[in-house]
Amino acid sequence: MNLIRTIALVAVGFTGIATAQKVVSQYDRETDFSKFKTYKWIIIQGTTPNQITAQNIVGLVNTALVQKGLLQSEGNTDLLVGFQTSVDQQRQINWFNNGGPRMGGMRQATTSIIEVGTLVVDMYDSGQKQLVWYSSATKTLNRGGNPDKNYERLQKAVDKLLKDFPPKK
């Protein structure tokens, strides 16, 4: 009974680890981010999500940028902001040993396909036409599932993506 309970607890622990979002950010260390006051959206060619997801991304990023003191404008701006998305499939292998090595248990493996959705937010210095901020979050977008949970996952990802923007010198 204890073995089964231990296996169940380990499985639950690995499930939490497997679904954690991974965020990576980079920025140009020569850039003075305090000079950026306004921004506008640009379209980055590539894979784009459906219209609703795109609107959600733009709305969440707008909210985060306004909270950081930036103003959205359609005229000449300091920053150009764009996003890219990707929803790939990955094969996940789940191993199970039903008796432990001392008991000579049988090892079994099952495979499943999981989608790993990535959101990338890029920011460009509009005057220099140079990338100054890059941030990506994996395990963010999901084509299926509960739309409220998907939105919540997206909201957490945008918060994490822009947590350290603008970077502190």
Image (spheres, rainbow, N blue to C red):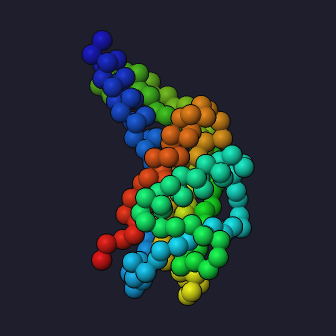
Residue 121 position, x and y percent, is: 54, 63
Report the front residue among 67 and 26.
67
> Is 146 left, or right, of 163 in this rendering?
right
Q: Is residue 34 above or below residue 21?
A: below
Give the quadrant of the C terminus.
Answer: bottom left
Give the residue at x 58% y 77%: 77
Residue 17 position, x and y percent, is: 39, 41
Q: Is residue 87 above or below residue 42?
A: above
Give the residue at x 53% y 57%: 61
The residue sitting at the left extreme is: 2
Report the front residue among 126 and 10.
126
> Is 34 left, or right, of 152 in this rendering?
left
> Is 116 left, or right, of 26 in this rendering?
right
Count of numbered circles in the view: 0
Give the residue at x 55% y 87%: 128
Q: Is residue 44 above or below residue 97?
A: below
Residue 59 position, x and y percent, is: 58, 53
Give the residue at x 63% y 55%: 86
Q: Is residue 160 visible?
A: yes
Give the quadrant of the N terminus.
Answer: top left
